[in-house]
Image: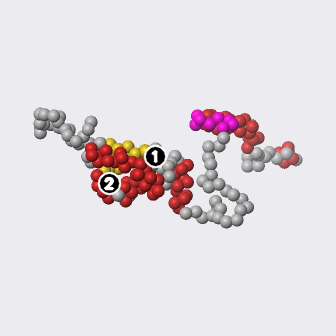
C-alpha cells in the first residue's frame, strides 16, 4: 500500500477555509467594526454616555385596563405626535391658517387683511390700508383668543401686522414729481 492510500490528502471542499487561507482573527475584525461605528457616531455628534435621542410616539403602560398605546390610534393623534417629534406643527398650522383664514378671523377682517406667514408661533399678516393696520393691532388680543379656541392654546403666540405695501412712484415712466405716496405710513 502506498502512503496516499493510507493517508488520503483532503480535498479543497473538505478542508476548512481557515486552513487554506490566512484569515484575520475574528476579534480583530470585531474591533475594527467597533472602531468604525464609534468614528461614525462621533462624526454625527454622539458621545458615549449621552442619553438616547429617540423617544416612543406614545408611552406604553403595561398591565392597565382600557385603551393603550398598542391599540389602533386615530390618524390625527398619530400625525400630531409625529409632527411634535419632528420639530413642531408649524407647517400644519400654517396650512390650516391659509385654508380657513376667513373662517378663523371672520369675513369682514379677512376682506381687509391677508395671511403672510406663520413661523415659531408668530403669525404675520398684511393689512390693505393703514387704518385697517391700526384696527388689527387693537384686535390682536381678541384674535389670539380666537386662535387659541380654534387651533389650540399656545399655538399662535404673537400677531405681527404689516402695513400695506403699495406701489413705489419714485421711478418709472409714469413718475409724478411731488410728495409721493400716501396711506403707507413708512
On the image, the x and y values in percent for residue 24 come to: 72, 36
C-alpha span from label 2 to label 1: 19 Å
Q: Nearer the viewer, residue 58 or 8?
A: 58
On the image, the x and y values in percent for residue 71 come to: 63, 64
Part of the protein shown in magenta: 43-50
Would you name the residue on which mark 2 appears?
109
Residue 116 seen from this side: no
How many numbered marks appear? Answer: 2
The answer to whether the residues at label 2 and label 1 have Cβ atoms under 8 Å apart is no
Q: Main secondary structure of the magenta part?
A: loop
Q: Which residue is found at the position 16% from the left and 34% from the top? A: 179
Identify whether 132 is placed above or below 48. below
Rendered-image quadrant of the C terminus: top left
Q: Residues within 10 Å of mark 1 (few under 14, many from 20)?
A: some
Q: Which label number is shown at residue 157?
A: 1
Residue 46 lies within the magenta run = yes
Q: Which residue is found at the position 29% from the left and 48% from the top? A: 132
Mark 1 residue element: loop
On the image, the x and y values in percent for residue 43 come to: 58, 34
Amino acid at each position: 500500500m502506498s502512503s496516499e492510500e493510507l493517508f488520503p490528502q483532503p480535498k479543497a471542499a473538505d478542508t476548512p477555509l481557515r486552513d487554506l487561507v490566512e484569515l484575520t482573527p475574528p476579534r480583530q475584525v470585531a474591533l475594527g467594526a467597533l472602531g468604525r461605528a464609534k468614528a461614525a457616531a462621533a462624526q454625527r455628534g454622539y458621545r458615549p454616555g449621552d442619553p438616547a435621542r429617540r423617544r416612543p410616539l406614545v408611552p406604553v403602560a403595561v398591565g392597565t385596563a382600557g385603551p393603550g398605546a398598542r391599540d389602533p390610534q386615530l390618524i390625527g393623534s398619530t400625525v400630531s405626535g409625529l409632527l411634535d417629534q419632528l420639530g413642531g406643527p408649524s407647517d400644519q398650522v400654517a396650512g390650516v391658517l391659509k385654508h380657513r383664514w376667513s373662517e378663523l378671523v371672520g369675513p369682514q377682517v379677512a376682506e381687509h387683511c391677508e395671511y403672510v406667514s406663520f413661523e415659531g408661533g408668530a403669525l404675520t399678516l398684511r393689512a390693505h390700508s393703514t387704518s385697517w393696520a391700526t384696527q388689527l393691532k387693537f384686535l390682536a388680543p381678541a384674535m389670539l383668543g380666537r386662535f387659541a379656541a380654534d387651533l389650540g392654546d399656545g399655538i399662535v403666540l404673537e400677531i405681527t401686522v404689516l402695513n400695506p405695501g403699495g406701489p413705489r412712484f419714485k421711478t418709472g415712466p409714469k413718475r409724478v414729481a411731488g410728495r409721493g405716496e400716501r396711506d403707507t405710513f413708512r
